[in-house]
Image (tube, rainbow, N blue to C red):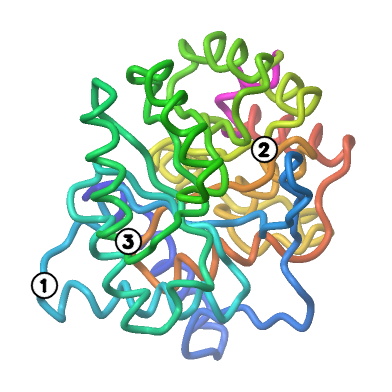
Amino acid sequence: MDKIITRRKMIKGSCAIIGAAGFNTLPLFAFNNTMINRAIPSSKEKIPVIGLGSWQQFDVGEANAERNPLKEVLLKMNEMGGKMIDASPMYGRAEQVIGDLSTELALNNKFFLATKVWTTGKQEGIEQMTASLQKMKRTSLDLMQVHNLQNWQTHLKTLQGWKESGKVRYIGVTHYTDSAHDRLESIVKSKVVDFVQFNYSIRSRNAEKSLLKAARDNGVAVIINEPFEQGELFRFVKGKSLPAWSEDYGIKSWAQFFLKYIISDPGVTCVIPGTSDVKHITDNLGAGFGQLPDVQGRKKMLEWITTI
């Protein structure tokens, strides 16, 4: 909870400053253009570069007080052109909540729904993935991934069959620690997956050593998790102002600063920051619009972070 509160406090503080200047609220973002899209190498289908993670935030009960804010998030995501929503059986009720709310809002088929298999054994995997389809209200999912490489050889064999039969459109593998990058890279180079998901941020750049390049060279789409280092980045910059040159890239917040650094790497297909707050999803999605930092811009961003 502290991680979520920290960002809310930052936004509340910004609102107070803007209010003192004669405005009533922190302005949300209005865009006349389309969010940046990137192609999935195995199919050339394009998806928006900013998506939505659901860990913790979508693990809620039946009460309207818990679910209504998530409806607002999904509505805003659709309004701004976001598509990918990432879930897992590991995330409690997230799959069911996503399925329920997106169906209730008549948006289920407009989203690119991704989830994972997180168990051991072929039959156990089949049963879990079948349950995920039912929970997410789909007869076919856009992406099924092997969560944290658990029993990945077994599950990928099953998923290859599911892809051929149309139960899933794409298959992939995931992890969230630097220590798994070598194993992910080996799988990427085997060219048996469409997607690879891993951790990457402006301060945690182990993926830049070779994993991002391996994915790009072998035609594998990349999903980035932990873009805010579970909220640590917001604590790191608390009380600090954005550099003036951030405006050159349309950066209006620290969240956009962090996200634009990630998506400015051409090997990144989509990044999935998690949130249950409509202001945060608006802020996050805003990073997918406008100019991205070039090589020199990325260098300036890194240099700035090291001075804080």
Kind of residue at disc 1: Glu
SS at circle 3: loop
Q: Which mark is residue 221?
A: 2
**Earlier-in-chain disc, 1 versus 3:** 1
Q: Measuring 10% from the left and 76% from the top, which residue is drawn there?
A: 63
Kind of residue at disc 2: Ala
Q: Position of residue 29 (x, y in %)?
A: 62, 78
**For this rendering, which residue is in front, 235 or 256?**
256
- Bounds of the magenta span? 201-209
Pointer 1 residue: 62
Q: Which mark is residue 177?
A: none
**Earlier-in-chain disc, 2 versus 3:** 3
SS at circle 2: strand
Pointer 3 residue: 136
Q: Position of residue 75 (x, y in %)?
A: 45, 80
Kind of residue at disc 3: Met
Residue 172, relative to residue 120: is it above or below?
below
